Amino acid sequence: MSRERTAAARIALVSGGNRGIGFEICRQLARRRYRVILGARDAAEGKAAAAALCAEGLFVECQRLDVTRDAGVRACVARVLERHGRIDVLVNNAGVLIDPHGSRVLDSELATYRKTLEVNFFGALRLAQAVAPAMKKARYGRIVNMSSGLGQLRDMGTGTPAYRVSKAALNVLTRMLAVELKDTGVLVNSMCPGWVRTRMGGPKAARTPGEAARTAVWLATLPASGPSGGFFRDRKRIAW
């Protein structure tokens, strides 16, 4: 790849990019000639993941990124902006599911909600607040929030209550950000990847991480006329 093409490439920051769906999002964006910043809480795991993608001939670099730390998020974003001058795409992929098996609202513990929200909701909020000013200044940006069908109010059920609450909150954040960033060139959307064979989804899940990543990549590469404030699965809008 030429120096000129690399310099002109879009810059994408992906949280939780060292494994699973996040890793595949990094791979697919890099294959589209995006300059991908793979954010990982564990620096060693992040470097290993980035090295694996670089071995495929892709441009991927690692930045330590713990979305639960205010100072760490600000420092990561500052490093990327200093090095590349902009951040065109933010994929809020980092997430946890720590509800005990079979848990219900009435027997759940508040600590589980706090730990879950810290990553799944506040992590995305921290990154959006840190990145959006640069996107607004550049008049271009794509923010993709990795949500879940378990956060849909229309079909809300029981089980994994902290996870459900966190994803419903993330969807609310998506709608509010989309309104606040209207007419700035920044598009904000949520997506549901489906049931995916990852550490979180387990080995019996129907989808591969590569399949799940496609909608995130589609939302990350939307044209200016693309949607904002929507919830999508398989590139199709779904109900909140």
Image: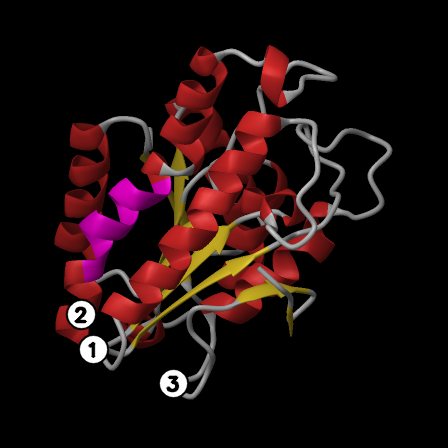
In the rendered image, which quarter is residue 231 located in? Answer: bottom right
Outermost residue to the front:
106
Amino acid at dot 2: Lys
Identify which residue is drawn at 20% across, 31% down. Answer: 70
Q: Please, which colouring scheme is shown?
A: secondary structure
Q: Tell me the CA gap for discs 2 and 3.
A: 14 Å
Residue that badge 3 annotates: 224
Please report contact status of discs 2 and 1: CB closer than 8 Å, yes or no: yes
Quick one: quadrant of the N terminus? bottom left
Residue 46: x and y in percent read 44, 32
Q: Is residue 9 magenta?
A: no
Identify which residue is drawn at 70% across, 38% down. Answer: 157
Residue 173: x and y in percent read 37, 52
Estimate how packed mark 2 is, as few (under 14), some (14 to 19) or many (20 or more) residues with alpha carbons within 10 Å: some
Residue that badge 1 annotates: 139
Amino acid at dot 3: Ala
Q: Visible in this render: residue 225?
A: yes
In the rendered image, which quarter is residue 137 located in? Answer: bottom left
Q: Is residue 43 above or below residue 58?
A: above
User: Magenta segment, which residues?
Assistant: 124-132
Residue 166: x and y in percent read 48, 36
